[in-house]
Image (cartoon, rainbow, N blue to C red):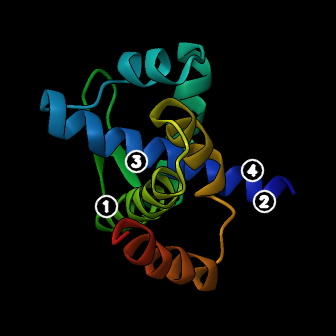
């Protein structure tokens, strides 16, 4: 369970780092902490761990950058999120709930289930 939570947290961080870089041109520790609702110290510890795992590069007083592995993880997480979100919307779930629910489900859904979700999105939206 601890490993699953650790992976989920890593995915959330790299996805947010990627989003911040696209939206703001950089990802700063302060922005990560604010967006995730954690303290600066907590965000710094996670970023250090992500750097040890080869997912980000960071230097003191500089922006945080995704490595190639981090970019891959962020893209995969973002794609899973979109599939789950779109499936929930196709089922008739409200936007606000689909977004919140997709955030949790995306980390735990199997590849098989994602493929079925994708298939069903097409069927549900053709009605």
Q: What residue appears at the point 65 percent right and 47 percent down from the top-left corner?
A: 104
Cα–Cα span, label 3 and label 2: 18 Å
Image position, residue 122 (x, y; %): 37, 76
The quarter of the displayed image where residue 43 is located: top right
Cα–Cα span, label 3 and label 1: 8 Å
Badge number at residue 71: 1
Closer-to-camera residue (107/39)? 107
Badge number at residue 3: 2
Front disc: 3 or 1: 3
Q: Secondary structure at mark 2?
A: helix
The quarter in which the N terminus is drawn is bottom right
Earlier residue among tags 3 and 2: 2
Image position, residue 99 (x, y; %): 50, 39
Earlier residue among tags 3 and 1: 3
Q: Mark 4 touching mark 2, by CB under 8 A?
A: yes
Q: Which residue is mark 3?
A: 15
84 up-or-down from 72: above or below: above
Q: Is residue 64 visible?
A: no
Q: Secondary structure at mark 3?
A: helix
Closer-to-camera residue (67/17)? 17
Q: Secondary structure at mark 1?
A: helix
Closer-to-camera residue (107/21)? 107
Q: What residue appears at the point 25 percent right and 27 percent down from the top-left corner?
A: 62
Q: Secondary structure at mark 4?
A: helix
């Amino acid at each position: 369970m601890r490993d699953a939570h650790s992976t989920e947290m890593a995915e959330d961080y790299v996805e947010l780092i990627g989003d911040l870089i696209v939206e703001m041109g950089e990802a700063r520790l302060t922005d990560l902490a604010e967006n995730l609702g954690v303290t600066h110290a907590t965000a710094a510890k996670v970023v250090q761990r992500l750097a040890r795992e080869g997912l980000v590069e960071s230097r003191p007083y500089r922006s945080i950058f995704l490595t190639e592995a981090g970019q891959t993880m962020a893209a995969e997480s973002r794609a899973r999120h979109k599939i789950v979100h779109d499936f929930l919307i196709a089922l008739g779930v409200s936007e606000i709930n689909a977004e919140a629910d997709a955030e949790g489900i995306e980390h735990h859904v199997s590849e098989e289930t994602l493929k079925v979700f994708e298939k069903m999105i097409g069927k549900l939206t053709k009605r």
